[in-house]
Amino acid sequence: EAAKAEQTYLALVRDYQSAILNYIWRRVGDPDLAEDLTQETFVKAWRALDRLELDDGAEARRRAWLYTIAHNAIADHARRQRRIRWLSLDALPNVSGGGNPAPDVARRDPLQQALARLTADQREVLLLFSHEGLPAEDVAQILGITPAAARKRRQRAREAFAVAWTAIGETLPNDADDPVGDAEVALRPPLDA
């Protein structure tokens, strides 16, 4: 049983390491931090091997389980950063908030500009559905909501994205048919990723 769990874990690393890294990088916007959080995700998965489903038909649940761990690693990091930022602002009242390259990237890339106008929850839903290509059931499990709520959040995120895209003065091909769908295609990783 332990050997099968280890083999399944190694298969998860092999099959999902790049996807998890891309997901985290798109959430945090920092490649070094994304690598650290990806490593943290897989370390936590290793430590939780006893909860890993080993059935042959459980691949989709294992994938959702891994994305849930990644989601929680990002949330834990954000909580730590808020605590650190709050403490550092008290300790050093004249500190500027520099050092984050994300605003510079957002100014150059219209897609990133539009995504930057969304809430973190809206960006995450679009990334999970569109970039990661996960079904509503997996997105629901990752976010701790029902599949119907996941689909509704996707709808709202798509509507917010369409407003943001228009607000930055961009138009998409096939704008009349599906203004968000074409941008969602841009969120997807290249086929060789």
Image (spheres, rainbow, N blue to C red):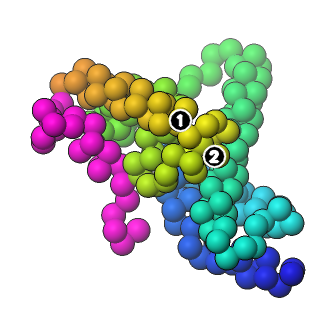
Q: Decide which of 189, 77 is in the foreground and name it.
A: 189
The residue at 59%/42% (across/down) is: 140
Left of 137 or right of it: where is 103? left
Mark 1 neighbour density, 10 Å: few (under 14) some (14–19) many (20 or more): few
Give the percent coordinates (x, y) of residue 185.
Answer: 29, 50
In what element is the residue under mark 2?
helix
Which corner quadrant of the image does residue 2 belong to? bottom right
Give the labeled residue for mark 1.
Answer: 148
Q: Say if residue 82 shows up in the picture.
A: yes
Which residue corresponds to mark 2? 142
In percent of the image, x 49 and y 53: which residue is there? 134
64, above or below 16, in the image: above
- Labels 2, 1: front one: 1
Residue at horizontal 34%, vertical 26%? 159
Amino acid on which the number 2 mark rests in the picture:
Ile
| Quarter assignment of residue 110 | top left
Q: Is residue 49 left or right of residue 17?
A: right
Q: Position of residue 75 (x, y in %)?
A: 68, 38
